Amino acid sequence: MNAMSPPRLHNTTAYRSIFISDTHLGTRGCRAEFLADFLKSVTCENLYLVGDIIDGWRLRRTWFWDSHHDDVLRLILRHAREGAHVVYVPGNHDEMMRKYVPLGLEIAGIKLQMETEHTTADGKRLLITHGDAFDSVVRHAKILALLGDWAYTVALGVNRYFNQIRVKLGYPYWSLSAWLKLQVKEAVKAIDRFETALADDAHRRGFDGVVCGHIHHAEMRTVNGVMYLNDGDWVESCTALVEHADGKLELVDWVARNKLSLLATPSGKAISKSAALAAVAAEIETSRAAPARV
């Protein structure tokens, strides 16, 4: 155990560990209201933020932030303040945080690391990395990666209108963008290459499994004898990987579990950049002032 388990609140589910990634805070596609609801509903000993938590690519171009995004950051800081061991492994969209990793920076109990490892309750060693280092487009063709990000954003917009029509016709939500990605033969091959490369790297380094994000495709399977665990995203799938007290690992689909609608319009109030930064600074100061839990 890395830290004392925080006190369990009413109507919360206690996990040993929680892994989330690809929340893309700062984008209109982020379902921050669902993520905030999830974070309010759980306690954990370990919380791993597996990259692309804050979307620096988008925020550099245009500012978008609302009260739900603010709630997510407050809740992450609250988990750290209440005793959870919190590690932030930056991804490619929040690569601005990577320059602070060599400094060993820790913000209000949140540790920054390029990658980390976790041992489950039943003794399995897991490598934790965002995964973009195994994406040849991100590594060698940044312009193509940015174009791909733009195309994905457009697809999400089209998807919203497409599903509004489906609902009027009596059909359930269906992800057009995810379907298109999986129908493109080369995209399917790329996902398989990504999964295999990560699993092989973990095996070579002596790990029993690897936890990652990056491709927005939640998955739990065995690849060449190694557990491949992708915790998905909080844009469309709204999933998290969790570890139970006995070491059992499970993918939680928050939308399906709670019968939520991805077509629901977020009700969060817009927050200016200065107000958002001031709120985060105040929350960090509160965390620093709080008595340490041992």
Image (cartoon, grey):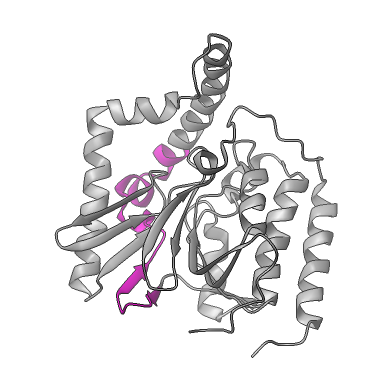
Q: Is residue 239 above or below residue 286?
A: above
Q: Residue at x 69, y 29 (%)?
A: 265
Give percent across and percent down for residue 186: 23, 32
Q: Is residue 225 above or below residue 192?
A: below
- Asked whether, in this view, residue 1 is left or right of residue 12, the answer is left
The magenta stretch spans residue 126: yes
Q: Nearer the viewer, residue 105 or 44?
A: 44
- Name of the residue lying farthest toward the front: 11
Q: Residue at x 49, y 25 (%)?
A: 155
- Asked whether, in this view, residue 163 is left or right of residue 8, the answer is left
- Asked whether, in this view, residue 127 is left or right of residue 146, the answer is left
Say which quadrant the C terminus sits in. Answer: bottom right
Residue 108 in view in this figure: no
- Name of the residue lying farthest toward the bottom: 294
Q: Nearer the viewer, residue 180 or 42?
A: 42
Give percent across and percent down for residue 63: 72, 42
Residue 165 position by quadrant: top right
Residue 61 in view in this figure: yes
Q: Is residue 169 above or below residue 89?
A: above
Q: Residue at x 63, y 48 (%)?
A: 25
Give percent across and percent down for residue 100: 57, 72
Q: Residue at x 44, y 67 (%)?
A: 244
The magenta stretch spans residue 128: yes
Q: Nearer the viewer, residue 79 or 16?
A: 16
The magenta segment is 117-146
Figure label count:
0
- Name of the residue lying farthest toward the top: 169
Give percent across and percent down for residue 221: 25, 53
